Image: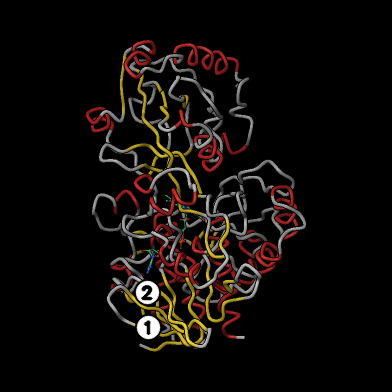
Amino acid sequence: MTNDVVVVGSGGGALIAAYLAQKSGLKTVVLERTNLVGGTSAYSGGSCWLPGTEVQQRAGLSDSTEGARSYLEALLPTPLSTNVEVFLAESPKLVAELEADDAFEWEWSPFPEYFDAPGRVPMGRSIQPSNIRRDELPAEVGALVRPPVERDRAGEGGRNTLSGGQALIARTLMAFVRDGGTVLTDHNVIDYVVENGRVVGVTTEGGETIRGERGVIVAAGGFEGNDTLRSANGVPGAAEWTMAPTGTNTGEIIEAGKALGAAIDHMDKAWLCPGLEQPEGGGSFTLGFRGGVMVDSDGRRYANESLPYDQFGNQMAGAPNRIPSHFVFDSREGGGLPAIAMPEGDPAEHLKAGTWTQADTIAELSEKLGLTDLSETVERFNTFARNGVDEDFGRGKDEYDNFFTGGATLIPLETPPYIAARFVLSDLGTKGGMVIDEHGRVVRPDGDPIPGLYATSNSAASIFGPFYPGPGAPLGQALVFASRAVQHITA
Ligand code: FAD
């Protein structure tokens, strides 16, 4: 099968690359290993950290490219890398290009940024595709979009209104198919076809060779679903706890790039988050804790529970007695988890499976779980909560801490029964992958590009290195470098 462009994977970065390539007149095929399109991107909130666009202007925000540069300069090594500068310069152009097509519609979504640094925009600068109804989509497109995580894990179909990441996938897929693009599901790409030193296609597990004469763009997730690669590279957490859909992102295609000579970077990093352990195993991305305390195996707090999830995940990864942790909460909300967990699971099932433990007193809970110092921890936290100041970890001070709780971040635990929910270290994908230049080209350790090979999304080393600047950073960078790859192919 011969095409101009082969795109490996079907998350946000992949589909934006495919859409832009097809729109430029290049015959483009998307190869997806599962039977559904969208990967983790379809589970996501669809938030994109794309600063300085018309969307933020329309919303009347104090956002600008310069403001975003100041913010990044406060976090990242300076001077900012060429890729970060390209990201800043290209974000507004990309969104304008997408919005020129009726298939796309973007809006600001309030969600505070993750660092109190100069240039931070109050309530955040992230944008997301507007919702779209299933009946606005061609049936074959609607049927391909991976359902939201809580339905997908239960083997259920999607809803009538597609929002967040589902809207991103649905809108982009709709436009790509409308323009004549091809999507082949159940196509697991295992290697590259190289001729005269140039990547000109891929081979699949099924034995097919699929040519992309002008370029191959890899946007096939990271290696979060592969325990061998995780431990070889020192990524904390585990494949069974990742949020990536089962059977998706196992990283062999990054390894194949490495075998071709690609440089790799940030291989020990992931977009981490606390994961509510589920009765059937696995972790659920959790954020927005209202009340409660997260404790280690001694029953001690170790961080501000309201930290941005990636920062909390890094705290969890910081000592062996924090995985698992226990989130201890009271019954003021009727026994449900006072946080947003995707999915939460049924409290009764949790209690039956032992992922949650309940007791009438904190002392009894401490005894049941061997959390020796829990009573002292809760007593201390309750004093902080009553005084309104967390003297140990400053919980409740930052805009982000209060966003999900309406300011009620410090709440004493005083309504029995008390519940301890087991937490593992989950992630939204790994951050390490093939190193790319400002054109999205995969480069060798000496900086020379590998002709014909491009990467973006979590298949490419994150331009933000160990940082997670704000909501939508993974998708924001994925989309921009998808666009850069196509610009280079068409130049
Ligand atoms: P994916 O979206 O997972 O896509 C990779 C696809 O490639 C998969 O479908 C996979 O099956 C396929 N694939 C893998 N290997 C191969 C192969 N060899 N051959 C063919 N196909 C292959 N990030 C944000 O930026 N904003 C958010 O709002 C946000 N919210 C989130 C909310 C939740 C609940 C979760 C779980 C994550 C969220 N994230 C968010 C994180 C973000 O979704 C992911 O980090 C990002 O979508 C990963 O994109 P990707 O293209 O690298 O991988």
> Disc 1 marks which residue?
210
| Mark seen at residue 86 | none
Residue drawn at (30%, 58%) of the image: 158
Q: Position of residue 424 (x, y in %)?
A: 40, 37
Residue drawn at (44%, 50%) of the image: 230
Q: Ligand 1 near label 2 (Cβ, under 8 Å)?
A: yes
Cα–Cα gap, marks 2 and 1: 9 Å
In the rendered view of the protein, which quadrant contains the N terminus?
bottom left
Left/right of residue 401 with respect to residue 155 in the rendered view: right
Q: Position of residue 63 (x, y in %)?
A: 69, 55
Q: Position of residue 432 (x, y in %)?
A: 53, 57
In the rendered view of the protein, which quadrant contains the C terminus?
bottom right
The local secondary structure at tag 2 comes to strand
> Disc 2 marks which residue?
31
Q: Quadrant of residue 175?
A: bottom left
Q: How has the structure been colored for display?
A: secondary structure
Q: Are marks 2 and 1 in contact (CB under 8 Å)?
A: yes
